[in-house]
Image (spheres, rainbow, N blue to C red):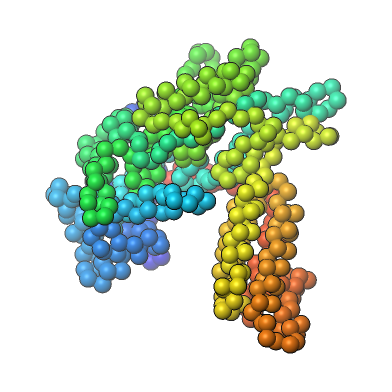
Amino acid sequence: MDSGDQADQAWLLGIQRKLYQWSSTNPDDTYGDLWNWIIDRRNLRIAWQRIARNKGSRTAGVDGMTVASIRATMGEEAFIEHLRDDLRNGRYQPSPSRRKLIPKPGKPGKFRPLGIPTVRDRVVQGAVKNLLEPIFEANFWHISYGFRPGRGCHGALEHIRMSMRPRAKAEDGRRQRTPYTWIIEGDIKGCFDNIDHHKLMQRVRARIGDIKVTRLLGQFLKAGVLAEGIVLPTAYGTPQGGVISPLLANIALGVIEERYERWTHHRQKIRAHRSCDPVTAAMQARMTDRKAGRPVFFPIRYADDFIVLVAGTREQAEHEKAALAGYLLETMGLELSIEKTRVSDPTEGFDFLGHRVRYKWHPRFGYMPRIEIPTEKRADIRYKVKQLTLRSTVGWSLTHLLQKLNPILRGWGNYFRFCTGASDLFANIDHYVGDRIWRWLMKKHQSLSRKKTIIRRLPSRLRPTRRVWRKGRTEQFLLSSLTVQRFRRGWMHAPAYALVPGKPDA
């Protein structure tokens, strides 16, 4: 990064810190002077650089322009200056997004619509997001994990595990009572396609008072999509694929945790002498309600996937499920899927973000929450390996096969390496992969009489004590080489603009 880029980043970081601190101090006020910062050359340059570094820079919108073609025709500086001039003079109008249907994995015949904005629109959306994100991030609650800087799905899963962990011990020293007895598994029908624009913009205007910014956001929502040569209007929803869409979706879906404010982020000061923070106050409210025999509901959300931990009876959980469906329809125009939204027993387990979460009885400690790799996910990785080692692929070289297999194994392993019992499963899959490669080589070299001298494993270059399938510098990736451990929520880092200069974490 050259000195000019560093100066731009330092300028933007200073503005973001100012907005974050203001928003933290004034959670109920609106900020009314953002437009000049949004159209500043430094902000537009940073937005351009992030778009250019993204893999999506090679994908064109409805105008057919990519980052490479813009650089080749008019150049970066001229593009940014022309875009800024259009924004200043009110000539800028968002273009429709190009619709592309992405097949849903494991669901043949079903597709997820993806809206691809033009590079020009992506840059403007990135510039707007740079200034809006600190304002809303300061007020997003700790139980929301999706599409937020420094947070991810593993943090959400660990939060669930920690919340489900029993504290009280019985006379025999084992934890026989669980803090939550039922789970509401939330599933919203076409969440990103059905968010009510008017209700979403009401939530945005509650924090953003700059009319030019809110008008621009409204134009992005109403820009439409181009499908099969026809421009279709977008009366509802936020287009998946837009730079600013995840932030807008989080703003809209914040109504879920706000419904359970008392048990998650207790802001209302009931007692005048209370001086604790909202999270601690919510924890005390949960303890008080449990002792009084009242139901407790504690949600954890990752984008549009969420669960609600319920301390109460099944009837109370079913009643809350129905009440939540009506609440979402009223506040955001969203509809819960009756078939997929269900009340589950945590001792039997439930699925969340591709993992299996359940209570398991331990003979020494009692009930313990576990995060496990679902059976279907193990079958999926075996199926993918088998498809790459069929007879139809024997024309490949061993190097090419390993280059196809290794990214799949590495990505799958890194996603599930925080699960209980992952070490044994990784070893089993390593054995399966090695056996499939051996069978593939036997098919490939059928005409050779001395197969043992050719088809043999070699010592790993990374772990010499292990023998793997290797060709030159390319070798089989071993899942068992990954460190299997429990995810620590302390690994999640707050964004730079949330850190106060001079503090140890800054």
Q: Residue at x 77, y 26 (%)?
A: 176
> Residue at the location (86% across, 25% down)?
172
- Given residues 229 and 370, the one toward you in this image is 229
Left or right? Give the position of 37 relative to 474: left
Q: Nearer the viewer, residue 178 or 444?
A: 444
Viewer-closest of 92 and 293: 293
- Is 422 on the left-hand or right-hand side of 131? right
Q: Where 325 sits versus 239, above or below? A: above
Among the 4 quarters of the image, the one containing residue 178: top right
Q: Give the quadrant of the N terminus.
A: bottom left
Q: Position of residue 127 (x, y in %)?
A: 31, 50
Name the residue located 66 percent from the left edge and 14 percent from the top edge: 291
Residue 421 or 106: which is nearer the viewer?
106
Q: Residue at x 65, y 67 (%)?
A: 477
In the rendering, at what x and y percent does residue 221 appear?
Answer: 27, 42
Residue farthest right in this picture: 172
User: Residue 326 in the image: x percent, y percent?
Assistant: 42, 23
Residue 476 visible in image: yes
Q: Which picture quadrant has residue 75?
A: bottom left
Say if residue 41 shows up in the picture: no
198 displayed left or right of 321: left
Residue 196, position as x, y percentages in the image? 32, 33
